Amino acid sequence: MFNKITFFILLSLRHQNVLKMSLVVVGSMAFDAIETPFGKSDKIVGGAATYIAWSASNFKKPVKQISVVGGDFPREELDALTDRGVVLDGVQIKKNEKSFFWSGKYHMDMNTRDTLDTQLNVLADFDPVVPEGYQDCEFLMLGNLVPAVQLSVIRQMKTRPRLIAMDTMNFWMETATEDLEKVIREVDVLLVNDSEARELSGQYSLVRAAKEILKMGPKFLIIKKGEHGALLFHEDQVFFAPALPLEEVFDPTGAGDTFAGGFIGHIARTGDISYNNMKSGIIVGSAMASFCVEKFGTQRLREINRVDIDERVQEFVQLVNFDITLI
Amino acid sequence: MFNKITFFILLSLRHQNVLKMSLVVVGSMAFDAIETPFGKSDKIVGGAATYIAWSASNFKKPVKQISVVGGDFPREELDALTDRGVVLDGVQIKKNEKSFFWSGKYHMDMNTRDTLDTQLNVLADFDPVVPEGYQDCEFLMLGNLVPAVQLSVIRQMKTRPRLIAMDTMNFWMETATEDLEKVIREVDVLLVNDSEARELSGQYSLVRAAKEILKMGPKFLIIKKGEHGALLFHEDQVFFAPALPLEEVFDPTGAGDTFAGGFIGHIARTGDISYNNMKSGIIVGSAMASFCVEKFGTQRLREINRVDIDERVQEFVQLVNFDITLI
């Protein structure tokens, strides 16, 4: 009898573990060439999923990656991710094609940038295939990508992940509205920046924009405001996390993705999808983003460890902590 | 013997009370005509000192006002302030002149505005006289005004107030640099907005700007960022308070002055000039500013009471409150 029960418990645990235990990340892995008021990078490795993986892997391993790269994508970059605990079974390598390339130039305020060049290359006809080993996905992070690709990944999941978070951008609001709305309907957490929230909702006030967007499907909305911090909306509640005031924002590329990686990494590590824990996730995401902007590309993210991250999170606590007694 | 001691204690208390117990506010009392995307006001009562007084008098009475108005300034406006606990002995009324007038138009983002008209009128040759009854000034709030006028008030104080806070604007940085630097050297707390902090310091990064400005004299620097909150810098410490996310910012005129009024009112009420209490002051200031923008001019400030304010402060606590445990 005892054995039978033990067996069923083990079976049930194994079943749970197989079905629901990993963090899957979808997004671009690419090359960027960046110009900021502080300098100019060569063609360096970037892409939403790259930043998300570097960031999230501080908190949760493995991170199971879905992406596509060309034959030009450096083998050592893939190896570095593997060493970090990122599974690349879902990353297609198209030997005879080129990786996605983006080039941009930031202005002094670092909140606005001009795109100088975009070459879709392998992204143009990316058809993601979710490996069987990814079916244990508990947390799915859809990085900014063609909405149809994001949707395809959701559809390929045999059981729905416990939490689906999604990033997107204004480009898809203008060119793939219908697909985008379909994906948004299916996710739990949507991440956009302030101008995207305004565009998506047609409302200038972010509070009103949030109300409209929460009607579109997501239960949680995160509005990223760059150096002005981030807002989390859920039902009638709102939470605000500042960005860390920095002496120098060297390169903001990937800061939003790094934020998303920290956020979903924290949620995946804790397994707690409550509103309260999402607040903590946003603090972790903000801390990660504050590292990202200190150097070009993913460089700073490769240098830091959990001690650095814990210290930075403590800086956030100091930054917003106050006691008040009114009479 | 007992009587003698009591007498000395009373004398000493009286002495203290006479020398140091009140809040003095210096600034303009004026007319504004305001256009926002939501509507247009008539010529309504405004001015830095007006907003500061309406805001601060929630926390500390009396507020002793130093200003100048023309014969056109409505008697009932002065009476309303008197009823509120604002002493007007230091407000000069120039019967045959006109009050300062400003007219402006806000854009959709409410952070930028065009000045349509400025008529200095009585402000052109304002020579402030500090009444004898104001010599008990413990807290001095210098609202935005000609630096020479701010300096004159400081000079007229027979003993230095315990805390001097000062607001200013970019206009004086460009037209009265030397005088402005003199005043800044003498104050404890400087309040400026982000673009003014950049202009004053010649630094784009607000963290660097703060370092430069703290070398100019003030021990505390508050950088107001409008809808993006406010930062407090002191030595190597930094505190951030968000602005309350509002559905509608109806009219931002006077929000900065209302913020200053809430800040100095809280400090004066508690008598605590520590860094920690300044953090609370900034939350109170932010709460007051969030009321100010809900209606044209000072209207909303006249409607609210301490219960409303306490509730709003609690909203700030909810807005930034988080628990985090990292492992």
Image (cartoon, coloured by chain):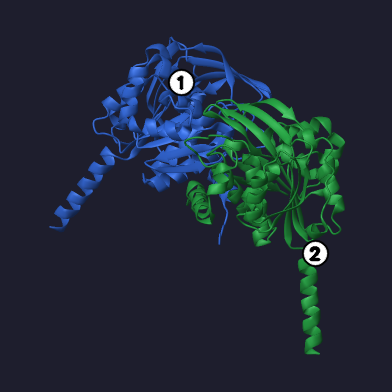
Chain colours: A green, B blue
- Relative to the observer, which residue lies in front, A92 or B318? A92
Left or right of A109: which side holds B273?
left
- Image quadrant occupied by the C terminus of chain B: bottom right
Instruction: Work out which residue is located at the far front of the displayed protein and give it.
Output: A96
Instruction: Work out which residue is located at the far left of the displayed protein and give it.
Output: B1
Question: Can residue A72 be spotted in the picture?
Answer: yes
**Which chain is disc 1 placed on?**
B
Instruction: Work out which residue is located at the far top of the displayed protein and give it.
Output: B96
Amino acid type, mark 1: Asn
Left or right of A110: which side holds A99?
right
**Which chain is disc 2 placed on?**
A
Residue on which disc 2 sits? A19
Q: In this view, does A264 lie above or below B155?
A: below
Which residue is drawn at the image coordinates 75% and 32% (left, top)? A170
Q: Is residue B114 above or below residue A281?
A: above
Residue on which disc 1 sits? B170
User: Is the residue marked by circle 2 packed among few (<14), some (14-19), or many (20+) residues within 10 Å?
Assistant: some
